[in-house]
Image: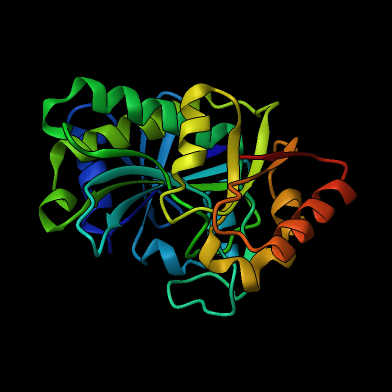
Amino acid sequence: MRRILISRADGSSMLVRRYLLEVMGFERIERNGREVLRKGSVEAVVTDGLHLHLSPEEIASVADELVVVASTHRSEQGVNALTVHATGNWTSEARYGGLPRALSSTMAGAIRTAFDALRDEASTERELEGWWVGLEVTHHGPHSTVPLIYVEFGGDERARASEAGAAAVAEACVEVVTKARPSNRAAVGVGGGHYAPAFVRLMAEGSFDFGHVLPKYAIPQGLDLLPEAVARTADGCRAVVLDRKGIPGAHRREAIAAAESLGLEVVQL
């Protein structure tokens, strides 16, 4: 079963809940002491705790095939954005949930479906004009053994309360639950900044579907987790794509060797 996850502790997530109820026609039911929103075969589970800090067991109780988290996006730089990404921590720091140096299971095909849906929504909604739409690198919790993705809207305080942003995320979440399929061009990305511009470009071109992305700033601690990133891409991984700019030669050679040892194609940008 695939389900959307909404958190009462996240105001943006609750705006998605309202859109599902008031615009998309979901109905409220109670199951096992939790609120569930339902329309046909699509369900959204509403939790009290903040999604970032849910345990693997709590995540597994939501769905066993795919969990799609509707979340706020916070940006210290005030970048208003619609984003999608996998979760996990490349380093020993786990301030925002999850486990130190551990990656969640994810699904590149689900990230692809959300990416395309968010781009479609942004292109037709005037209130989202100027918003950035794309990927973020793998970061924060929760840790999940069930394939999981985050679909987010926000940036500054006003953007985090955007009804248009909530609508875009709600529509994208439903698209993922109903239409996402495993990708035959799944890849792990290595390098670049937090918003992964090189990998966003490849997604827009249709060249690859990215699951986990290791940013340049986390390479010193996180590069040895590359085999884990591949193993936890539920679709099966075809390639490792390197954004070479700024990656020291020793790290680049290590990434290439790891990819080749796993029998994966290596693409260098």
Q: Quadrant of the N terminus?
A: top right
Q: Quadrant of the C terminus?
A: top right
Q: Residue at x 73, y 38 (%)?
A: 239
**Where does the image place residue 104, in percent across and percent down from the top left?**
61, 57
Q: Answer with the quarter of the image where residue 207 lies.
A: top right
Q: Residue at x 50, y 46 (%)?
A: 149
**Where does the image place residue 263, in percent across and percent down from the top left?**
88, 42
Residue 80 visible in rendering: yes
**Where does the image place residue 250, in percent across and percent down from the top left?**
74, 65
Q: Residue at x 40, y 30 (%)?
A: 174
Q: Of residues 168 and 249, which is closer to you in this image?
A: 249
Q: Please tell me how many numbered marks the rendered image carries.
A: 0
Q: Of residues 177 and 241, which is closer to you in this image?
A: 241
* Position of 21 relative to 80 (above/below): above
Q: Is residue 46 left or right of residue 16?
A: right
* Position of 51 relative to 80 (above/below): below
Judging from the image, the colouring scheme is rainbow
Q: Residue at x 70, y 61 (%)?
A: 249
Q: Of residues 24 and 128, which is closer to you in this image?
A: 128
Q: Answer with the quarter of the image where residue 108 lies.
A: top right
* Position of 8 relative to 212 (above/below): below
**Where does the image place residue 42, in percent across and percent down from the top left?**
44, 30
Q: Answer with the quarter of the image where residue 117 lies.
A: top left
Q: Of residues 217 and 168, which is closer to you in this image?
A: 217
Residue 3 visible in rendering: no
Q: Is residue 3 left or right of residue 120?
A: right
* Position of 154 relative to 166 (above/below): below
